[in-house]
Amino acid sequence: MSKTLSDALVFECETGNYHTFCPISCVAWLYQKIEDSFFLVIGTKTCGYFLQNALGVMIFAEPRYAMAELEEGDISAQLNDYKELKRLCLQIKQDRNPSVIVWIGTCTTEIIKMDLEGIAPRLESEIGIPIVVARANGLDYAFTQGEDTVLAAMAHRCKQKESNNKTETIVDKFVESKELKSSESSFLKTQGGEASLRTMSQGFSNILAQQNLLNFTPKSFLEKNNTISVETETKTNKSLLKKEKNHPPLVLFGSLPSTVTTQLTLELEKQGITVSGWLPSQRYTDLPSLGEDVYVCGVNPFLSRTATTLMRRQKCKLIGAPFPIGPDGTRAWIEKICSVFGIQPQGLEERESNIWKSLTEYLTLVEGKSVFFMGDNLLEVSLARFLIRCGMIVYEIGIPYMDKRFQAAELSLLEKTCLEMNVPMPRIVEKPDNYNQIQRIRELQPDLAITGMAHANPLEARGISTKWSVEFTFAQIHGFTNSRDILELVTRPLRRNQSLQGLGWTQLVKQNG
């Protein structure tokens, strides 16, 4: 089937303004993800009120974030920024003793040109705690891009991965340093270097890490295990080698709940792919090692800055894949990673099919319904693609910021999905003008509008069912098993309307709208 001009995706850009939730709210999920961290948001009382109301922290809770509120003296540069921030950081160290302190810059720190990047290194060396500086101001970034700036800053703190050449040199030195029998020497060299030595014994792994290789003799190791026959030993070695990853290191980036990271890690392990680490990790001290031999892959579409940092600064190789949202996206994500490593995926088609069967009750409700994305959290393209696969019609995808390079695979899957489902291509509007969008919504009368909180109540008053886009940010929507959660959010207002139909409430609202 040849693709006509009308079949192509249409991209537009309207006002150039961000109409989104504030990006400093990324603190809400990042401080929970990085368990040994402390986040210090540097801004005005307005920022404090926003965090207090948006995050809904209970009065008895003691979260690992705080506000450094700028007063008139700070803004007019009458006070010493360094002394004030040092005082706060020393108090944080005394009270919480975190492994890392993350400074979140706001609009105010940008406007008054506060030199956070200049202050941080000096203060870090003085108090003895790493200080990561991230800009999350609403002038430059949309809602979820706050996480993007934090992860990009943390990428600079990751350790450099040692090259394979160094490992080979260590093993060679070990073999040369001891007058080993030829059989023992060949055994070491044929088992794959450092990785296989690690499988021989935990004690030897510790010695190898310290490069003190003279006190270990493979002969003594074999003598302790003399009950193992040669045939059994060979099988054991093969099984151990099979468990070792036979592909380059893979690091996944994106902040997800621990249960979801475990699910995605296990899905890849089923295909024989080992995940070397996550950015961010649960503990700052466990950040993954990066380098030229490391492949990286994102799980969220708003992490383009992090992807760029990993490629340009850390020299990692980026895997451009659709994002693991919905059964279709998760399958495509795994397949892409497998293809890069030359692995033939197994059982994914059946896995996806079973998930779709489990969603039948939701699919019946959404089939043929229309949806309009006003744009807020940069998840819009992935969600739209999944809902189109569910049988919905997407009129428009509003999105605050679009990086076509980072989302190229996702856009391609969206296009493919529209063709397979035989539905019109939705228009994609970057930085949409809210006034124009409201007019289009009134004309199209979609069954559902996914929007920021500012427009939800006015649209509801005019008879348009809405869903807050921020709810998708905080919900678990990645992977095969969490597809149900997406449809649970989408169908909630539709199910509510069905319940109200018998009361005539919906018609009454539309008449008075």
Image (cartoon, rainbow, N blue to C red):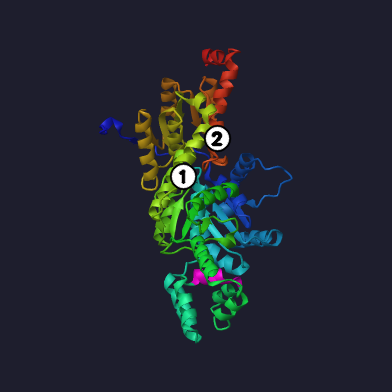
Residue 333 can be seen, yes or no = yes
**What residue span does the magenta drawing correspond to?**
194-202
**The magenta stretch spans residue 200:** yes
Please name whichever residue, 189 or 430, is drawn nearer the observer in this view of the structure: 189
Q: Is residue 127 left or right of residue 447?
A: right
Q: Looking at the rendering, in which quadrant would you find the N terminus? A: top left
On the rendered structure, is 89 left or right of 267? right
Circle 2 sits in a helix, a strand or a loop, which is it? helix
Label 2 packing within 10 angstroms: few (<14), some (14-19), many (20+): some
Q: Is residue 352 magenta?
A: no
Q: Secondary structure at mark 1?
A: loop
Q: Position of residue 438 (x, y in %)?
A: 45, 26
State the image coordinates of residue 356 (x, y, percent, origin top left): 49, 34
Q: Position of residue 84 (x, y in %)?
A: 62, 59
| Residue 347 marker | 1
The picture places residue 286, in percent across and down from the top left corner, at 57, 61
Quarter-of-image position of residue 431:
top left
The amino acid on which the numbered mark 2 sits, given as a three-letter code, is Arg
